[in-house]
Image (cartoon, rainbow, N blue to C red):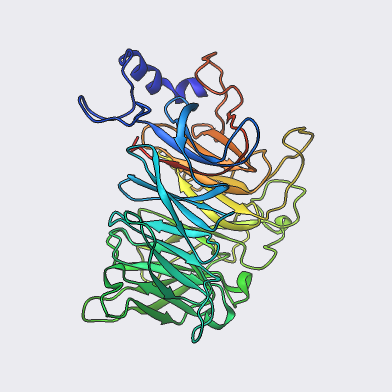
Amino acid sequence: MKKSALLPVLLVFGGCGLVSCGGGGAGAAKPPSGLTTRVLASQSVSSPTASPGLVLINGWIDRLQRGGISAGSSPGLMAISPDRTTVLAFDSVSNSVEVGNTQKESSTGAIPLSGPTISMVALNTGFGYAAVPSAPFESGPPPGAVEVMNLAAGGLTATLSVPNAQTVVASPDGTELLVFGGDSQISHVVTILYPLLVNTGNPATVTVSGFDSPVYGVFSPDGSTAYIMNCGAQCGGTQASVQILNLGTTTTPPTAGASLPVNGATIGFLSGSTLYVAGQGTPTGPLCASLQNAAPTAATYCGTLDLVNVATTPLQDPYYNNPAAEIAITDGYHDRIDMSVNGQLFIGSYDCTTIGNVNNPQGEVRGCLSIFDTTKPGNSTAVIPPDNGDVTGLQSFTTRDVEYVAEGGNLRVYDTLTDSLLLDNINDSNFPETGTIIITGYIIDVKAIDFF
């Protein structure tokens, strides 16, 4: 219930009076909005009543605020530096990365890319990295590169060849980036990029072979190992699996390690010794009717969630090829995953099977979001909320039992105590009545820019 979910909020507000709450000590410098619990959502719209940009939300009470950051004509995908001082937004109209200063809540300029990107990261070093699959080269390598952006001075400082570069993932300390391409010629390769070696005259990238259509990676907390999601047959390869990548040392090169078959693998999330792995395994995914734990649905195909134990040698997955245990989730290509502070795993996909109409619900309503309770021993069932559309953004918080979900162009607020929309059942006008923050236009991504 919302009342229990927001009890800490009400207590905090009661003790704050007119002072802005949600973080920051006495005398701490505050941004122009005066808020310390800020969330930005990328709004891709142009109309007489709204302009595109990064809209500002008070994440303590789920309310749209005045202000925001301009970000081109059609901002969508976002990335934020680990210290949350710099936010990036990709403008699909101009193929530019819009750079924002979160402390000043203002734009600092735009950096043109050579083509569109669906993956980028920002580091605390003041540099950003975008995977551009169509980046051209006049001769030599095929198209595709990681383009290195100087976020302070503006402009590109390097273009590093990675054929058909699709996805870039940063290590915990930002000293290594994993780059994944989708080209059939490099479907067995993971590229490691070393940011500190860019423009030093030394090779800044190295490739490691021996994988099966790798598409994503999750680093161990100490950064010594990465767990690679091999997409397998879903992406034209052979078998979905999780494979170890030993990242090496100053004296030893990185090497591909052992692999573990899983039901599907396009995205993963590591919590403790459990690696949660989502995917379809094949272009369609398994028949929902073949999965014993799947709820009745009009959808023909489902995705799966595997729980891999990374503390064992070799890795273990009791869910693989085990219909009695397999966890059914929505189908589609799974590329969004996040865990709430109370252990609810949110998994999002795109191009999933849509059932019903959330705006006129009659019978089953189904979209691209799945929620799995990781705290329930032996849990084998995921919640499929009644909504429609692709999931394009997820954001959890450390002080609230809620999750922001951008799905179908809407910004939903989920109560993670009930895994349902956070409805206003305490008649507080501060909070959205329907579990949706009403924002004109199409919401694509969402990022918290304060630690709360």
Number of numbered discs visible in the structure rendering: 0
Quadrant of the rendered image containing residue 205: bottom left
Residue at image point 65% right, 57% down: 332
Whole-percent x, y for residue 127 in the image: 33, 59
Picture layout, residue 338 above or below residue 386? below
Whole-percent x, y for residue 106 in the image: 39, 39
Whole-percent x, y for residue 145 in the image: 47, 72
Picture layout, residue 32 above or below residue 390? above
The answer to which of 314 and 146 lies nearer the viewer is 146
- Residue 307 seen in render: no
Residue at image point 51% right, 74% down: 144
Q: Quadrant of the C terminus?
A: top left
Quadrant of the rendered image containing residue 116: bottom right
395 displayed left or right of 392:
left
Residue at image point 22% right, 29% down: 28
Picture layout, residue 61 above or below residue 230? above
Residue at the far right: name it: 362
The answer to which of 441 and 207 lies nearer the viewer is 441
Residue at image point 70% right, 64% down: 284
